[in-house]
Image (spheres, helix red, strand yellow):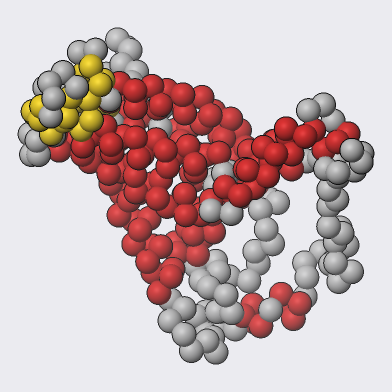
Amino acid sequence: MPRDRYRTFSSAAPASAAPAGAGPMPAGARGRAHTESFAQTERSDWWWLKPLSQALGLAVLGGYATWAALQGQHYEYGNYLSPFYSPLLRPSWLPKWVSPALLILWAPGGFRATCYYYRRAYYRVFFLDPVACAVGEPRKGYQGEAKFPLILQNVHRFFFIVTLVFLPILWWDVFRAFTADGHFVVGGGSLAILASTTLLSCYSLSCHSFRHLIGGRLDCFSCVVAGGPRHKTWSVISRLNEHHMGFAWWSLVGVCFADFYVRMCSMGIIHDVVWTFRQAMDVSPNP
């Protein structure tokens, strides 16, 4: 087997790239939109539709997630646990008016807030920087995330590591959602929790940080221990990474829906119907 079978090389910087320490690029080199007035553009398409839909999506889903996390009640129903409250921590010193979700949501919340795709979305829709491609920006001084406070976005990789600890716990919640009194059951809540955990896993494992951790920092896979398996794993993660933006949105929808379903069942607004193996085709309300 040739030694360089798994060899990869970093693409060289283009000749036109500004050298390190050369200062800000001239306005002409940054595109015409940089010199346009705010929202001025020659685009004739509905360029505002995408940022508007992203703004509505973030406002609705992010607003619901924040509201649900602050409630501190109706997060359990039978063998179901809302993913916003997993792992469930209720120490004796925690005041009753403080939601236990606040003890754990800092990790997945920080992971999403510093995510590359979410950054692009909320930079555009909430800070209008930039609004869209080839559309005039309100500010002209943005030069990247190399200075405070935006340099703090680099903690994304550390939030990713913490988030990995949560995935086995969420899958344990899936196991619990499909069992009741020692029997295998299938209900609306168990399916919602399964979908939520699957999407959360795809979103986490398709992260750029995980791809880099597996092999993105290597120039030669055959030069390291277990280079072949690492290259195959890196290839799979790279395929997942192509859909990272979709996983980011669908996982947010999935986790909000799972909490909503458990919450509605706990409040008695809807009745969960489960199928159990204790009796053939036995359909009964979830206890």
Which of the 4 image quadrants contains residue 37? Answer: bottom right
Evaluate whether residue 190 shows in this view: yes
Task: Kindly identify the residue that appears in the image at 77 percent across and 34 percent down.
Answer: 228
Task: Kindly identify the residue that appears in the image at 68 percent across and 50 percent down.
Answer: 147
Q: How many marks?
A: 0
Work out which residue is located at the far front of the displayed protein and give it.
280
What is the x, y in percent for residue 17?
84, 67
Of residues 275 and 63, the one nearer the viewer is 275
Q: Is residue 109 positioned above or below 241 on the image?
A: above
Of residues 162 and 222, the one nearer the viewer is 222
Q: Is residue 84 left or right of residue 270?
A: right
Task: Kindly identify the residue that appears in the image at 70 percent across and 39 percent down.
Answer: 232
Q: Is residue 229 positioned above or below 182 on the image?
A: below
Q: Is residue 278 positioned above or below 251 on the image?
A: above
Q: Is residue 9 positioned above or below 264 on the image?
A: below
Quarter of the figure with the C terminus:
top left
Task: Kindly identify the residue that appears in the image at 13 percent across and 34 percent down.
Answer: 272
Work out which residue is located at the far top of the displayed protein and give it.
92
What is the x, y in percent for residue 281?
12, 29
Which of the 4 image quadrants contains residue 28? Answer: bottom right
Evaluate whether residue 73 shows in this view: no
